[in-house]
Image: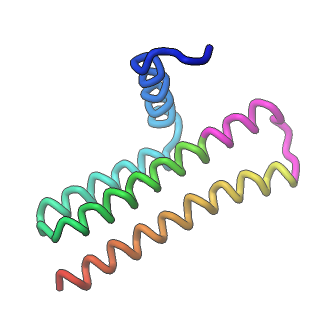
């Protein structure tokens, strides 16, 4: 299973993104927000550093949402019953997504203030 060609590994990664898109409303919402951010950047044409910061923030939010979704799906598969500790794990993963999303909003607010 290890050391597969890059094209095969890329296919696995894209399949994971497609699965998340199909099954996770939060991921689709974050993708919509990323599209909005890109549109805003093209509209206001800020300095390159803002493109980099926004791109990094978007990538981090989407990556953490993918990880959160993977953790939740794995937990639900391995332990479908409700358990307080499992609930804490899911809440912590969701908290990570919320934290980076708030960081992305700080970047957006900073950009708005700079461009005003």
Q: Is residue 58 magenta?
A: no
Place residue 54 in its image quadrant: bottom left
Residue 58 horizontal side relative to residue 3, left or right: left
Residue 84 horizontal side relative to residue 52, left or right: right
Where residue 80 sits: x, y (%)?
81, 35
Quadrant of the image containing the C terminus:
bottom left
Determine the residue positioned at 37% across, 48% down: 31
Extreme residue in the front direction: 3
Where residue 2 sits: x, y (%)?
60, 17
Q: Against 109, is 84 above or below?
A: above
Depth check: 78 or 5 in front? Answer: 5
Determine the residue positioned at 50% across, 36% down: 20
Where residue 88 sits: x, y (%)?
79, 57
Q: Does the magenta stretch include residue 72?
A: yes
Q: Against 91, is 18 above or below?
A: above
Where residue 18 sits: x, y (%)?
44, 30
Determine the residue positioned at 67% across, 36% down: 73
Determine the residue positioned at 56% across, 58% down: 97
- Secondary structure predominantly adopted by residues drawn in magenta: helix
Q: Against 7, is 90 above or below?
A: below
Depth check: 3 or 87 in front? Answer: 3
Depth check: 15 or 10 in front? Answer: 10
Q: Against 49, is 114 above or below?
A: below
The number of numbered badges drawn on the structure is 0
Q: What stretch is highlighted in magenta?
A: 70-84
């Amino acid at each position: 299973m290890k050391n597969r060609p890059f094209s095969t590994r890329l296919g696995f990664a894209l399949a994971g993104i497609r699965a998340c898109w199909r099954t996770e409303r939060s991921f689709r919402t974050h993708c919509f927000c990323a599209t909005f951010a890109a549109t805003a950047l093209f509209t206001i044409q800020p300095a390159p550093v803002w493109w980099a910061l926004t791109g990094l923030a978007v990538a981090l939010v989407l990556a953490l949402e993918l990880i959160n979704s993977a953790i939740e799906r794995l937990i639900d598969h391995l332990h479908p019953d409700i358990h307080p500790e499992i609930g804490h794990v899911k809440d912590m993963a969701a908290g990570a997504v919320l934290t980076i999303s708030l960081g992305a909003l700080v970047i957006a607010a900073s950009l708005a203030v700079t461009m005003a």
